[in-house]
Image (tube, grey):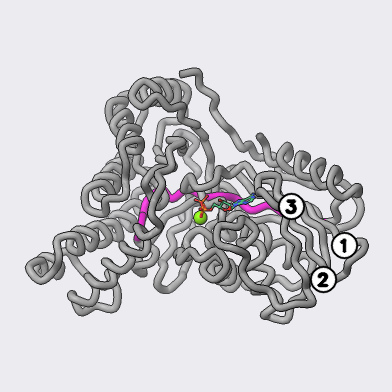
Amino acid sequence: MTLKELTDHTVREFVKKYGRQPRWIVAAPGRVNIIGEHTDYNDGFVLPMAIELYTVIAADSSTQETNQIRLYSTLGDKPAVVDLTKPLKPLPKGSWANYPVGVIAAFLARGLNPGGFDAMIHSTVPFGGGLSSSAALEVATATLLEVITGKKLDLVEKALLCQKAEHEYAGMPCGIMDQFISIMGRENQVLLLDCRSRKPELVPMSDPSVTVLIINTNVRHQLTGSEYPMRRKQCEAAAKILGVPSLRDATTELLEHAKGRMEKDVYHRARHVIGEIERTQHAADDIRASNWPAVGQLMYASHRSLRNDYEVSCKALDTVVDIAKVIGLKGGMFGCRMTGAGFGGCAVALVKTDAIDAISKKIAADYKKKTGIEATIFISRPAAGATVIKNNGSGSPSVRTNICARVSVPA
Ligand code: ADP
Ligand code: MG
């Protein structure tokens, strides 16, 4: 589905629900992290790119209740109604509307009151697949509120505001990567983000001979919820033993010296993070040099480390990476790894553009044979970050026409 088609669909849903045309339309993309996994909360580097899958919000000021915000999502269960005359607080845990409501609360806390409005939300970013539908929703909401209030935030401030919404309203102690890339993404560029200084650096990736393939395993493991906080704690414990503020400041030598003073798990977690921070910086250099085989090797190494040391992979993700290795350089596959927090969700691969069809078919068929599950495969060029598509009461939306492609492959 193109962004134009997604926008048209969202507008139709808005009109169906509210009986009038929307005055504002905004979009924010999901993202895929090329490399740099579980490094963000360790002050390390990440290397994400925005993808051609988006969350779109169509909205208009309220016709009746000036102090009421109505939020509908085509994909959310219940609509949410926000009463602006009362202090906002989080909805019950797990409510989809916590993401937009958290952003609204942050704007109100800055004295930026959008007044009552009606909104319709639709998205092509799959939920919980490691492509950050949550940040796309937060960033789309923040972009809408900027348009409504007429106050454009500093980009970093906007990202931090969205992150805080996720912490405080959705109860998820996420890092800063997802919100930064959904805001700062640029076409044909990936983002090397230093999570310590918060300094973003765009890295050109415009070589048309390579394409990023995203393979959704369509597996999502039921976790107890303790896995992510537990790993954060283990990283903090490792940093403490090493006597450094965070694992960003540690080196492999330092870690090896302290090995005997650490629990085995803590050592392994730290080894992943320290190695991954290095790999991410190397990958940015290799992308700059269009050295795709080198980037691919770093992706495989990242996967190995996430599987063996960080222990956040799973059978479905390992299966995809094993299939990629069989395809190999000869078949046009540079490298592949799990992406996102892990335990299911998506793998990301770097492939030769002219081999996309053959590779997609092979991955889909072999994955189905080995797991019995249909994978969903997307291709994407590095996309632009959040945009305002329409900002007035009249006229037709001007929409970028980049493609949000989904390869459908018969298994
Ligand atoms: P990820 O960010 O990897 O997709 P998360 O668990 O962080 O996974 O966020 C997914 C949750 O975000 C969904 O379960 C839902 O509550 C919310 N969400 C994201 N996009 C939308 C949307 N368009 N409509 C309703 N809820 C959404
Ligand atoms: Mg998320």
Most foreground residue, 405 or 175: 175
CA neighbours of label 2 inside 10 A, class few (<14), some (14 to 19), many (20+): some
Q: Nearer the viewer, residue 394 or 354?
A: 394
Q: Where the N terminus falls, by quadrant?
A: top right
Mark 3 Cα within 10 Å, few/some/many (few <14, many 20+)?
A: many
Q: Dot 3 lies on which element?
A: strand
Q: Is residue 61 above or below residue 301?
A: below
Horizontal relation, residue 58 to residue 254: left or right: right
Residue 188 percent across, percent down from the top left: 54, 47
Q: Residue at x 37, y 51 (%)?
A: 35
Please report whichever mark, 2 or 3, sits nearer to the chain's N-terminal start: 3
Q: Which residues are magenta?
A: 24-38
- Please give the residue where the numbered disc 2 appears in the rendered image: 115
What amino acid type is highlighted by mark number 2? Answer: Gly
- Which residue, given by chain and number where applicable, does mark 1 sit on? 62
Q: Is residue 32 magenta?
A: yes
Residue 350: % across, % down: 40, 38
Q: Which residue is mark 3?
A: 72
Judged by its main secondary structure, the magenta piece is strand
Give 246 or 133, whichever is nearer the viewer: 133
Instruction: Judge whether 82 appears above or below 213 on screen.
Output: below
Label 2 – label 3 distance at C-alpha: 17 Å
Q: Residue 242, image x and y in percent?
A: 18, 75
**In this picture, residue 154 sits left or right of residue 273:** right
Q: Amino acid at mark 3?
A: Tyr
Instruction: Tell me the amino acid under the disc marked 1.
Output: Ser
Q: Quadrant of residue 230?
A: bottom left
The span from disc 1 to disc 3 (Cα, nearest Å) is: 14 Å
Query: Disc 2, disc 1: CB below 8 Å?
Result: yes
The residue at label 2 has a CB less than 8 Å from ligand 1: no
